[in-house]
Image: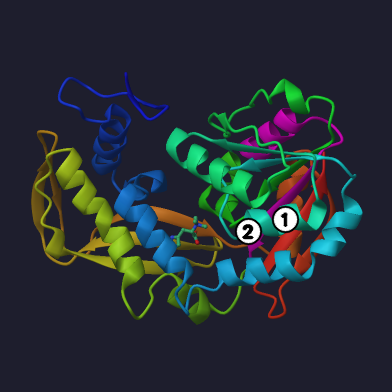
Amino acid sequence: TTEKGLELVNRDESGVDTAFRADVLSGLAQDQKAIPARWLYDEAGSQLFEDITRLGEYYPTRAETEILKERGAEFARHVPPGCAVVEFGSGSSVKTPLLLEAIDPAAYVPLDISGDFLRASAADLATKFPGLPVYPVEADFMREVALPEQVADLPKLGFFPGSTIGNMVARTAVDLLRNMRATLGVGAQLVIGLDLIKDRDVLLAAYDDAAGVTARFNRNLLTRINRELGGTIPEEAFEHQALWSDVRARVEMHLRAVRDVTFTVAGETFAMKAGETIHTENSHKFEERTAWMMLLAAGWLPRADWFDSQQRFCVMLAEA
Ligand code: AVJ
């Protein structure tokens, strides 16, 4: 175990992230090859995702920001005064201030597994809201997290924007929502952003933009594998693919081999036929009623929801 900032990453004697290697090797050994989406976000990948949020085709960030900006006063009416906002993830420099301004909380508690992101965004928030106590917690929020004792007696408001829940299959999403309830406690509220099912061409364009930024984001995973795991994947033999699965209500990202390929990763050999893919990300889309069902299944009672002016995105408020 070595320390990268405060973030604990397990590395072997040659410096390889052992969790990354295990996920890649087991993912490539499957019939339908698949690598968990979290590995898309190395430094280059995180920068490319930032670039994605500014693309004309990528509407979710703008739609959610519109809701947080325009409807803040309405959230505030549902939220008790002097609460602690607990954000699942380090927070974005745009969305988090919008929520904090709207509800004027007594404390802000960002939770993130990456100590580096956590400290950077906590410092940024502390400058923007000089009087607001900020208590960052480095933790895996997929599990129940012990909150700092300074917020023990405050009402809790969970914040989970960005339709990040859409990255998870139903079982994982419900497990997370249940654990959020355990973390926040009975009586807590949750503000959660969800992207909505819409015209297929609009969805696909958001994940396959004309400038090719999403393609670079997806293909960067191959670069990362080659660099960090000593891979020999011929990157030019793979193309970005975004597809809509109607039955699963999700956009899937894949890396598709355009010809037969053989390569090695961490000493193991893999072969793919032309047309075969590596599945790299799911982005589930919701309807109001499927979102309510998911929240109810996890023990959350939906109280209100808000949509952007074009009905592309939804922010829901639920109570534990
Ligand atoms: C950050 C997971 C919400 O699924 O829309 C954007 C990631 N992937 N373009 C999403 C992403 C490709 C994004 N989330």
Q: Is residue 149 magenta?
A: no
Q: Is residue 186 magenta?
A: yes
Position of the N terminus, as image quadrant, is: top left
Work out whether residue 291 can be spotted.
Answer: no
On the image, the x and y values in percent for residue 143 come to 59, 29
Residue under the image location 46 percent in, 42 percent down: 117
On the image, the x and y values in percent for residue 247 come to 55, 63
Quadrant hosting residue 316? bottom right
Q: Classify mark 1: helix, strand or loop.
A: helix
Report the side of 304 relative to 221 (left or right): right
Above or below — where is 108 with respect to 55? above
Q: Are marks 2 and 1 in contact (CB under 8 Å)?
A: yes
Badge number at residue 95: 2
Which residue is denoted by mark 1 in the rendering?
99
Q: Cα distance, mark 2 to mark 1?
A: 7 Å
Residue under the image location 41 percent in, 54 percent down: 281
Image: magenta residue range: 174-196
Report the side of 22 relative to 85 (left or right): left
On the image, the x and y values in percent for residue 63 come to 63, 71
Residue type of the residue flagged with mark 1: Leu
> For the residue carrying disc 2, how many other residues have a C-alpha within 10 Å: few (<14), some (14-19), or many (20+)?
some
Residue under the image location 56 percent in, 56 percent down: 93
Report the side of 41 relative to 24 (left or right): right
Q: Is mark 2 within 8 Å of ligand 1?
A: no
Badge number at residue 181: none
Above or below — where is 242 with respect to 78? below
Give whichever of 308, 168 is nearer the camera: 308
